[in-house]
Image: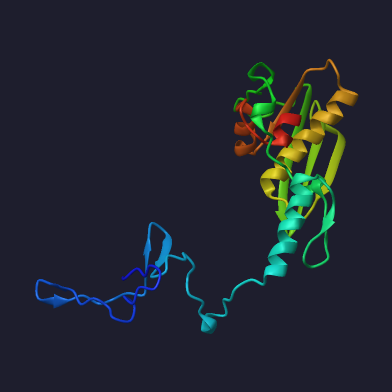
Amino acid sequence: MPIAFGKSNCLLDQARLVMDGVSLNVAKSIRYLGVEWDSHLSFTPPSKPHQGKGVVPLDLVDKAEWCIFQVSGLKLPTLDLLGNEVNPIDFDFPNDLHLSHPVDRRSLGFGSRLPCGDGLEIFTDGSAINGAVGGAFVVCYYGYVIHRGLGRLDDRNSVYQAELTAILKTCEWMVQKLTGTTVSLFSDSRSGLQTLVNPDNRSSLARSI
């Protein structure tokens, strides 16, 4: 692949290379380590209209970047390109670990056991069904359901976020109703529990828990 610098005519008068008696074909672009290289080193893959892929208009790119900045940077609600409201409270923004002292980074341990129906046991779960995302928790006292909590998340949230939200809402309910009481909390979200174990996790949901 010839690389053109300035007014080089290497693209018009291409070099002819022969290796072991075989002429080498000249390529217009190559892909190396996942990056598209072309003769002008623009690192922009050539457009292919027949595949329906074109360049995104700059005004749309500008609006999208401004929307991201308002939500993630300024923490202000705004509208996306389709006119739908985007609210920062619907996102789990990563925390900057440099803003907290290592002593203040806490973690929660967990074990693996089945419920036994003794005392207070709370079960949490998060799921996505037919595009709807939500979380819930059920409080049992010696095997009898005494309270239920349900919550709907934005459809763009993940099941992982729903699982952590269910645990967070459970903790908030326990602080209000069961302060000083021993409670067993059960969750089937191993990824969520492993996040709580890591004191250096950047999840705002996990740190709230």
- Image coordinates for residue 54, horizontal then vertical, percent: 58, 76
Q: Residue at x 83, y 32 (%)?
A: 144
Q: Nearer the viewer, residue 120 or 45?
A: 45
Quarter-of-image position of residue 195: top right
Quarter-of-image position of residue 199: top right
Q: Quadrant of the C terminus?
A: top right
Residue 35 vs 102, above or below: the answer is below
Q: Residue at x 77, y 39 (%)?
A: 166
- Image coordinates for residue 24, horizontal then vertical, percent: 21, 75
Q: How many marks?
A: 0
Residue 148 falls left or right of residue 57: right
Q: Quadrant of the N terminus?
A: bottom left
- Image coordinates for residue 200, horizontal then vertical, percent: 61, 28
> What kind of colouring is applied to the model shown?
rainbow
Q: Residue at x 80, y 47 (%)?
A: 88
Residue 108 vs 93, above or below: the answer is above
- Image coordinates for residue 145, horizontal then vertical, percent: 84, 34
Residue furthest out toward the right: 176
Residue furthest out toward the front: 7
The answer to whether residue 209 is seen in the rendering is no
Residue furthest out toward the left: 21
Residue 24 falls left or right of residue 201: left
Q: Nearer the viewer, residue 66 or 186?
A: 66
The answer to whether residue 105 is seen in the rendering is yes
Residue 66 vs 19, above or below: the answer is above
